[in-house]
Image: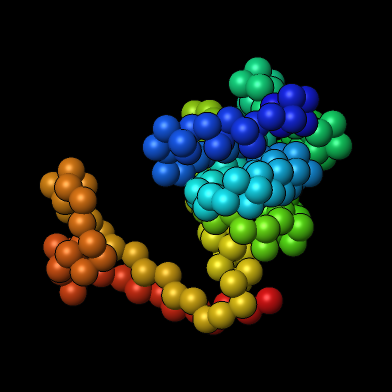
Amino acid sequence: RHLTKGTEHLVLLRKAGYGAKWFISQAVYDAEATIKLLHDYAGECRRRGCRPVKILLTFAPVGRPKTLQFVKWLGVHVPSAVEERILAKANATESKTKEAAVLESIDVCCEALQRILQMAGGCGVPLGLSVESLSGFREEIDGCFELFRRLQATMLDSVCSPWAVRWYRVPVHSMARSHSEEQLAADAGPEMAEEEQAAGSI
């Protein structure tokens, strides 16, 4: 909406004034629209002397024409070049075209995040990630895991310092309460915790 109305950054400021602590974007397929929004929001925050709140950038894998139609019905802007890239894979004559189209959409999303971080990562707006499945199709649901893994690595690499990822198997009863990392680790138990570390670099 920001490309057409040009006022979405003011909407964010108004909602933050009402107490919103963070925002989740629509699915991002157009990096340039997001870059403009982030710069406009950061600039208006500086002008007003307030601190920007975190924006979670949402990405979603798509691999079927039906899903793309649904995405556009939701009001998400999908550039024609992006749509053509994905549909070219989905409509190909080779086998496993649905999986190939999903992988192409994952590449599109990763390229979009890289562009956003390059052009707006230092504008002052804290960023986070959200990955959604927009359909019930198996290959698109499975693609969410690969997409999150790649986006997470891209985001962490952008901080130019070593990073670690830690997973916990959290008991169901714990999900109903708010816990610190230490409490989650204690609930999960040492035999159930899994840790993976990697050195991040640009």
Say how many tags the image has. Answer: 0
Vertical position of residue 31 compared to residue 78: above or below: below
Question: Residue placed at 52% from the left, 32% from the top?
Answer: 14
The residue lying toward the viewer, choosing from 63 and 155, is 155
Question: Split into 4 quadrants, where in the image is the C terminus?
Answer: bottom right
Residue occupying the far front of the picture: 48
Q: Is residue 165 left or right of residue 102?
A: left
Residue 13 x/y as whole percent: 55, 37
Where in the figure is residue 110, as x and y percent of width and height?
68, 54
Q: Is residue 109 left or right of residue 199?
A: right
Q: Position of residue 196 (x, y in %)?
A: 41, 75
Q: Residue at x 34, y 65 (%)?
A: 167
> Can see residue 38?
no
Q: Residue at x 57, y 42 (%)?
A: 58
User: In the displayed structure, would residue 135 be above or below residue 177?
Assistant: above
Q: Is residue 195 above or below residue 51?
A: below
Quadrant where the N terminus sits is top right
Q: Nearer the viewer, residue 65 or 60?
A: 60
**Residue at x 53% of width, y 50% of height:** 50
Which color scheme does this rendered protein use?
rainbow
Residue 115 falls in image quadrant:
bottom right
Coordinates of residue 15 in the picture (x, y in percent): 49, 32
